[in-house]
Image: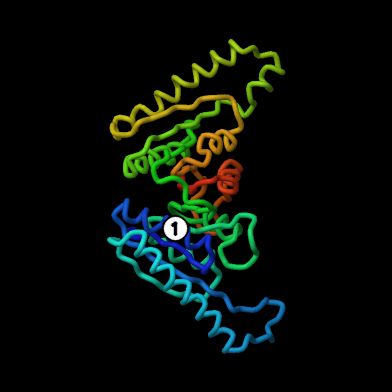
Amino acid sequence: MNAILVGVDGSDAATGAVRWAAQAAATEGLDLKIVGAYDASTSDYAPGLVIPQDVIDAIRQDASDAVHTAADVAKEAAPTVTVATSIVDGDAARVLLELGKDAAMIVVGTRRLGSVKGLFLGSVSTTVAAHAHGRVAVIAAEGSSSGPVVVGVDGSPISDVAVAEAFRQASLRNVPLVAVHTWTPLDADALHGYGIDSAEVKRMTQDAVEVVAERLAGYAQDYPDVRIERRVLPEEPAKALLEAAGTDASLIIVGSRGRGGFRGLLLGSTSQKVMHHAECPVMVVRGA
């Protein structure tokens, strides 16, 4: 558990992920492992088809070039971090999940809605985030290094794991923590439409503020250096987290159910929405 694992495929998205992973490794005092996965297999429906060896060699060379370029990027971003590289034949998501079992964190880049060229599209990042055993960071944008860490708080064990990691990350990065709690997925206008007046919404919000303050008190004692901003409001959770983060956050942290592995549960809807729309790195933390 002394290394961060990052997958690369030569794309701009992967380069951003490498830069972020290298800086994270420096922040956490960890090594960095860069892996390039290449898959030259054919469909099960075409068992007789054989890809020529020179084509396989060229595909492997592309993966090797991507890894070596990524290592240069990592050394420039974090000169003090120890960097190791490897090239593996296999499906990108499965390779990362297998190698990531012993990693402190897996980092992947994503283009979200971009080109279909390259390995690390949304499907790979979503698969890794949904099934990994530990922490996964999905990098669509590198965020602001001085921006706050944003985390959702709902009182569940899954949320508690994410909150604990959020305090740790805010302390490591010396940035504020924004704790977001939505006490109902209905926004204020919808509540008014159901006959709840503004004073009642305000009272219910204040009650929720007190509950959140109690929930965070223990973590605040453990991390007295972390400045906390609490945002408590009626709103859809993913929307509230994304609005709190904007384009200035350094990191959004969300929890995930399941024990990891391909039989683990998929990500919840809030985690998926945040991953797909965030303008900063998103860290998915596995709950018990």
How many discs mark residues in the rendered view? 1
Residue indicated by mark 1: 106
Residue 68 screen position, x and y as percent: 42, 73
Question: Against 193, is 260 above or below?
Answer: below
Q: Quadrant of residue 44?
A: bottom right
Residue 199 screen position, x and y as percent: 58, 10
Dot 1: element: strand
**In the rendered image, which quarter contains the N terminus?**
bottom left
Q: At 49% from the left edge and 43% from the top edge, which residue is drawn?
A: 255
- Residue 130 visible in the current orientation: yes
- Residue 288 visible in the current orientation: no
Indicate how the structure is coloured in the image.
rainbow
Question: Left or right: 207 with respect to 239?
Answer: left
Q: At 46% from the left edge and 65% from the top edge, which residue is drawn?
A: 98
Q: At 51% from the left edge and 29% from the top edge, which residue is drawn?
A: 181
Q: Quadrant of residue 183?
A: top right
**In the rendered image, which quarter contains the C terminus?**
top left
State the residue lying farthest toward the bottom.
53
Graded by Cα atoms within 10 Å as few (under 14), some (14 to 19) or many (20 or more), the crowding at tag 1 reads: many
Judge by depth and name the residue closer to the eye, 167 or 139. 139
Three-letter code, disc 1: Ile
Question: Against 106, is 155 above or below?
Answer: above
Residue 21 screen position, x and y as percent: 41, 57
Judge by depth and name the residue closer to the eye, 16 or 40. 16
Residue 239 screen position, x and y as percent: 59, 36
